[in-house]
Amino acid sequence: MNRLFKYLEHHGCNTMRVALKETKGMGMGVYATQAIPAGQVVLKIPLELWYPMSAGCAWTRLNDEEPKLCEDLIEFAKVNSRTNKTRSLLVGSASLIVHLLRELANKEAIATPHLDMIPKTLHVPLFWSDDKLARLQASPIVNKVERRRKLVYELYSQVIGPNAGSAITPPNFAWGWSLILSRAISNMKDQMPFAVVPMLDFFNHASEGEKQSGFCTHWFDHEEKAFMVQTLQAVEADDQLFISYGDLGNSELLRLYGFCLDKNPWNRVRVVPEGVENLTIECNLNGSMSLDRLNNEIDTPTLNSDQIARHLEYALSKYGTTVEADVIELTQIREQKALFKPVQPEATPSTCEFQDIIDHEQALLARIGEKRSIAACLNAV
């Protein structure tokens, strides 16, 4: 950790106000080392730190050193992406993954002090067994994970493997994919660079609606070419600092980051009506919903309230258990969890069992959030 902070300071990032600490149930977290007033910039991460870990840097290097890989990647994106935005994201993601995996293997790489701090095991549904995925029941996450696995496999077998050679294996590439999903930051609307940003990637998530103590805002300053983190309220020394990963329900938090919140006002689920093409029903926890066309060029039948209710009832029945039963199961799982000591990094049988309990807990929170969202909309209609 000292090596990381020396690296940050050497490249112009003042870290006097922050420290990294292990956080129960949340991995590493960022903490204030002193009292900080509201509205203060606690971190400024300059170009020298984030650019070596960016898609822009990755693409420039790959294009110079391996133009054939880049050409094949562009062709793959054209076939597998519908819009210019998703093509750009796919190309940027794949090039960044290859770049980061090579930097991880190169102990002389400039970003090694940061890369060495990144967890090498990621507990996200992409890596879950079929038995673990089954705990999600009828959740749309299952289908998304299966589609992601297929995309990652095809991208590796058609582009990365033939060009990159044996240095990057299928498991490595899949791990790299989850790494950028969970740690990279980007915002095309604000023209924020796509990068794994040192220190910013250690901030844990809090929903903006929670008014969590220690909540910070973050942005990219285009004039300074730096990522900035600023307190929104006064914090005391040893308070944990948080940022928002977005207005995400538990299902998306689990799929992307491997965790859920006990109370998440952004819980939602997208229901695909049985036998109705080109239409989905997005159900929100607050009872609001929207009927969305998948393709605006295709005529789609409208649904009245009775039809919507029948589709929602059917969607709820596909889960197989009730919310009440899930809550009881969640209580039992947490009782088991309380019997364990904190997880150690070593993969001993006890820690594997502990991780299975954590994954079970998160699956329950995700499916409870989805069921409650459907039930809220069902009550509304």
Image: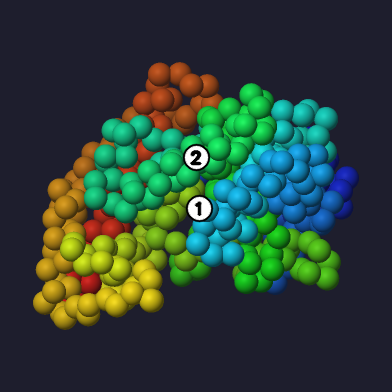
Q: Could you tell me the amino acid type at mark 1?
A: Asn
Along the line of sight, which residue is nearer the eye, 120 or 153?
Answer: 153
Quadrant location of the N terminus in the rendered image: top right
Badge 1 element = helix
Q: In this view, does 225 lie to the left or right of 271?
A: right
Q: Indicate the position of residue 239 as horizontal and vertical percent values.
A: 60, 54
From the viewer's perspective, is residue 195 above or below residue 110?
Answer: below
Residue 183 visible in rendering: no
Find residue 373 and report its horizontal and vertical position in percent.
27, 65
Question: Of 366 and 67, which appears nearest the observer?
Answer: 67
Left or right: where 143 falls relative to 98: left
Amino acid carrying mark 2 in the image: Glu
Q: Which residue is drawn at 27% across and 39% down?
A: 134
Image spot of residue 260 (x, y percent)? 40, 51
Taking the spot 71% from the left edge, 41% from the top edge, the residue there is: 68
The relative height of residue 137 versus residue 193 in the rendered view (above or below) is: above
If you read the primary sequence from the N terminus, does the residue marked by circle 1 or circle 2 appear first? 1
x 50%, y 68%: residue: 208
* Residue 300 shows in the view: yes
Residue 80 - label: 1
Label 2 CA crowd tier, 10 Å (few <14, some 14–19, many 20+): some
Q: Where is residue 42 in the image (x, y as percent from the top left)?
A: 73, 60
Q: How is the image coloured?
A: rainbow
Quadrant (top left/top right/bottom left/bottom right) for the C terminus:
bottom left
Specify the quadrant of the image occupied by residue 156.
top right
In the rendered structure, find residue 154 and report the number of the disc placed on it: 2
Query: Are discs 1 and 2 less than 8 Å apart at CB?
Result: yes
Query: Real-space Cα distance between discs 1 and 2?
Result: 10 Å
